[in-house]
Each structure stands twice: as structure tokens, then as C-alpha cells.
Image: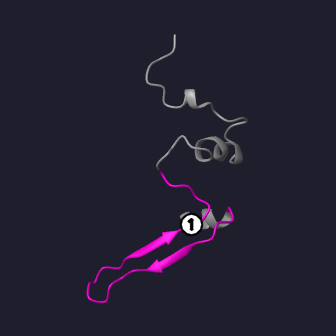
Amino acid sequence: ACVKLAARAGHDFLVLDQTRPDIDVPVVRVIVPGLRHFYRRFGPGRLYDVPIALGLRKRPVREADLNPLFPRT
């Protein structure tokens, strides 16, 4: 399902089989150029552009409105 969604969005996959022949555990590394890493969550892109592209929001959310620690009065 993830591969189909990413492919539909026009992303390519780079897959490297890192399985060692002496250990019977399959290991692969997958890189999708154009995707962002999980950290730096408030950086440009992920939280601001994607909801608009998916039709979930009409305009970007403000960073101040993301996970507020205390209720505003």
C-alpha cells in the first residue's frame, strides 16, 4: 500500500539488498528521494503542504497552532 501511494505521487524508490549471506535475516534499505525524514517535524513541507495537497485544509496551519502546550485564554 505504501509503495502504491508513493508511486502515485510520482516518487521513485531506491532499494538496496543488504542481506548478508552468512546470516539468515533479510535486510533492505529503501530510500525515496523527495520525502522528508521524520525529525525536524516543524520544517517546511510535511505539516504545511501535504494537508492542502490532499484537500484536507484550504490554507496552511500556523506553527503556533501545532500541538500547543497550554490552552490559550
For the image shown, how many numbered marks are present on the structure?
Answer: 1
Q: Is residue 56 visible?
A: yes
For residue 31, side relative to residue 48 (left or right): left
Q: Which residue is mark 1?
A: 32
Residue that protrudes farthest toward the top in the picture: 73
Q: Quadrant of residue 69?
A: top left
Q: Is residue 47 above or below residue 5?
A: above
Q: Position of residue 36 (x, y in %)?
A: 55, 55
Q: Position of residue 11 (x, y in %)?
A: 64, 66
Q: Position of residue 70 (x, y in %)?
A: 44, 19
Q: Quadrant of residue 8?
A: bottom right
Is residue 33 covered in magenta?
Answer: yes
Q: Secondary structure at mark 1?
A: loop
**The N terminus appears in which quarter of the rendering?**
bottom right
Q: Is residue 1 visible?
A: no
* Front position in the image: 36 or 67: 36
Q: Quadrant of residue 65?
A: top right
Q: Is residue 52 above or below residue 24?
A: above
Amino acid carrying mark 1 in the image: Val
Q: Residues within 10 Å of mark 1 (few under 14, many from 20)?
A: some
Q: Residue at x 60, y 65 (%)?
A: 33
* Front position in the image: 42 or 6: 42
The residue range painted magenta reads 9-38
Q: Residue at x 35, y 79 (%)?
A: 26
Q: Residue at x 57, y 43 (%)?
A: 43
Q: Main secondary structure of the magenta part?
A: loop
Q: How is the image coloured?
A: one colour
Residue that protrudes farthest toward the bottom in the picture: 21
Is residue 46 covered in magenta?
Answer: no
